[in-house]
């Protein structure tokens, strides 16, 4: 087992008291919402996030410039950030060429993509599941492991595919085992189109966690139908301790739901951190510093983001009774 993988395995165990929040907004959401944002501003944002106590940040994509014309700055961005000790910086690698680009940067971990549904894999990645598993991913993982980088894998449509329906826990187990064998240190179960519910989440996770696999399991829920936070809680109760979230809920437009606004897709980091902390579950994240990052993101986006906490404040925060409510209008008559 390579060192990265071993250390990643020790970091997140289901009996850990502390949960790990993986911030995805610099990669997933920010480029879409803040179109034309300079690399310098992106670097400032990532540096600010690095000071909040977050332990893992997805910060760049090594996509082809044709697919990501506004975000083609991964190398420059990673060179520019002030890497903080204890924070793992992650870059999305869509194929072998992207992986080779990533290896010559200081990125700590790569993110690879696969779907539990063959149809979704073809539509989203342009390859059959077999092609991904037998050709592309072994080559990427081999390169990453040889270069001492850890690998997290997104298992898209893990809780259902909009084109083919339900995905069985047995299918997920087989895919997780293959990714683990290839050298992935973390598999993220992604509810790509928001089809999960707390019961399906618990049923799926019970099967996976009972196997006590030598791999970290994480979840990445989408709020397409308003169930994302409930699903996070169900995953926590099942034993999951790693959660993907995005500051302010920043996201791109959801798959196949074009009527939904951007930003209504990912779980807002500040809302989930607040919820865990209020429940006595430590996140290691400084909520005030996190809210400063939300303010910065809103300034860059020139819009309000859908996260709740910036406007609502902490639920434990006692506020003074406003003057206009201090005298009851009926009693005054
Ligand atoms: Mg997402």
Image (spheres, rainbow, N blue to C red):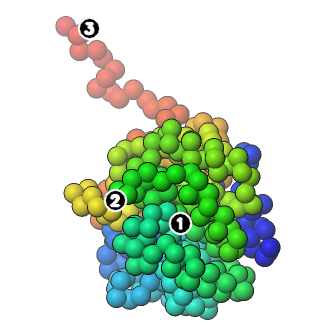
Q: Secondary structure at mark 2?
A: loop
Which circle's residue, 2 or 1, is located before the other in the chain?
A: 1
The answer to whether residue 253 of the structure is visible from this angle is yes
* Residue 243 vertical placement versus 105 (above, below): above
Confirm or deny contact between disc 1 and disc 3 (CB under 8 A).
no
Q: Counting other residues with Cα less than 10 Å from the Cα at mark 1, is it few (<14), some (14-19), or many (20 or more)? A: many
The one nearer the camera, 94 or 121, is: 121
Residue farthest to the left, as pictured: 333
Residue at x 31%, y 23% (from the top left corner): 325
Which residue is at a point 44% across and 47% down the rendered structure image?
196
Q: Which residue is tagged 2? A: 163
Mark 1 or 3 closer to N-term?
A: 1
Q: Which residue is mark 3?
A: 331
- Distance from mark 2 CB to nearest ligand 1 atom below 8 Å: no
User: Residue 33 occupies which quadrant of the picture?
Assistant: bottom left
- Residue in view at x 33 percent, y 62 percent: 255
Q: Position of residue 205 (x, y in %)?
A: 60, 47
**In contact (CB < 8 Å): disc 2 and disc 3:** no
Q: Which residue is mark 1?
A: 154
Q: Earlier in the sequence, mark 2 or mark 3?
A: 2
Q: Eyeballing the image, is 136 above or below 89?
A: below
Element class at badge 3: loop
In the displayed structure, 237 sits above or below 157; it is above
């Amino acid at each position: 087992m390579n060192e990265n993988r071993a250390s990643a395995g020790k970091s997140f165990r289901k009996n850990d008291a502390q949960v790990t929040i993986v911030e995805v907004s610099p990669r997933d959401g920010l480029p879409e919402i803040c179109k034309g944002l300079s690399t310098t501003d992106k670097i400032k944002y990532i540096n600010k996030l690095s000071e909040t106590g977050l332990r893992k940040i997805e910060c760049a994509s090594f996509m082809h410039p044709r697919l990501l014309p506004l975000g083609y700055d991964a190398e420059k961005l990673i060179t520019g950030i002030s890497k903080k000790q204890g924070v793992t910086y992650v870059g999305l690698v869509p194929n072998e060429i992207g992986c080779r680009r990533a290896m010559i940067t200081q990125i700590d971990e790569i993110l690879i993509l696969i779907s539990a549904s063959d149809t979704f894999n073809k539509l989203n990645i342009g390859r059959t599941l077999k092609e991904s598993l037998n050709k592309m991913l072994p080559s990427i993982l081999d390169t990453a492991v040889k270069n001492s980088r850890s690998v997290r894998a997104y298992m898209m449509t893990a809780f259902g595919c909009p084109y083919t329906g339900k995905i069985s826990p047995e299918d997920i187990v087989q895919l997780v085992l293959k990714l683990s064998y290839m050298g992935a240190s973390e598999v993220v179960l992604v509810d790509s189109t928001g089809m999960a519910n707390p019961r399906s989440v618990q049923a799926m996770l019970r099967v996976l966690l009972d196997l006590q696999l030598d791999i970290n399991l994480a979840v990445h829920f989408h709020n397409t139908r308003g169930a994302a936070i409930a699903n996070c809680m169900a995953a926590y109760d099942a034993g999951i301790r790693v959660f993907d979230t995005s500051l302010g809920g920043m996201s791109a437009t959801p798959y196949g739901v074009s009527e939904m606004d951007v930003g209504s897709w990912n779980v807002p980091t500040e809302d989930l951190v607040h919820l865990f902390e209020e429940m006595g579950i430590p996140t290691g994240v400084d909520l005030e510093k996190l809210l400063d990052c939300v303010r910065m993101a809103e300034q860059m986006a020139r819009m309000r983001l859908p996260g709740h906490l910036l406007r609502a404040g902490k639920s434990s925060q006692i506020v003074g009774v406003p003057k206009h409510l201090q005298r009851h209008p009926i009693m005054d008559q």
